[in-house]
Amino acid sequence: MNSRTIFALALVAFGAFLFWTREETLHVGTIFAYFWPSLFVIPLGLFFHWLYFSMLHRRAPGLLIPGGVLLTAGAVCQLAMLTDGWGYLWPGFILAAAVGLFEFYWFGIRNKWLLIPINILAVLSLAFFTVFSLSSLLNMLPFARILLAIGLVVAGVYLLSVKSKEV
């Protein structure tokens, strides 16, 4: 990627930020307040990835653990900063640990026992994302709670009315 492309992407991102924010005054502190993950955390995660992939023999897959964690955590922080969704996006930090360990597994020695904590962290993160997303959706939409209640009653009546095949 050449410098012109990077500059063009920066201009597009800054223009979208100006369109998105409704603040009367814009100063450098505002940019740092909104984009600190993109300025500090994500580049550090990319630096760890660059260190690993720039090595000729790739003998240090341990660099991918902090690289994956920082890259994922930076993306979660940036998304939370832009949407003010800290209360819903915090399971992304659990996912960050799973991503770092998975990169270590994928590009490293592929120890199958490493998949146990990876899967536990990923499922835990997905479960928390689901629970908090559904609860926020149910709180935002007043009719969603009524639809859920009707669906649960219908499912319960169906299970009671269907004859089970006991052996």
Image: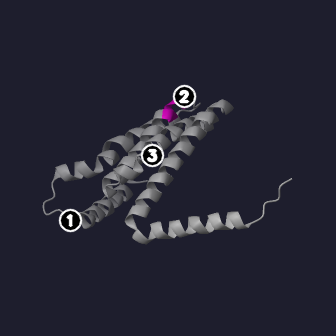
> Relative to 81, is 23 above or below?
below
Report which residue position mark 3 lands on.
91
From this view, report whether residue 71 is shown above or below residue 22. Answer: above
Predominant secondary structure in magenta?
helix
- Residue 18 in the figure: left or right of residue 136: left
Q: Position of residue 158 (x, y in %)?
A: 68, 67
Quarter-of-image position of residue 151 = bottom right
Q: Residue at x 48, y 52 (%)?
A: 131
Residue corresponding to mark 2: 60
The amino acid pointed to by label 2 is Ala
Mark 1 or 2, closer to the camera? 1
Query: Where does label 1 land, which residue?
Result: 22
Mark 3 vs 1, N-terminal side: 1
Magenta stretch bounds: 61-65
Disc with the residue nearer the chain's start (1 vs 2): 1
In contact (CB < 8 Å): disc 1 and disc 2: no
Task: Tell me the amino acid under the disc marked 3.
Answer: Pro
Element assignment for label 3: helix
Work out whether residue 5 or residue 86 is closer to the camera in this orientation and state it. Answer: 86
Report x, y in % for residue 6.
36, 55
Q: Residue furthest right?
A: 167
Residue type at the position of mark 1: Arg
Find numbered disc 2 in the image and state the secondary structure of the residue it sits on: loop
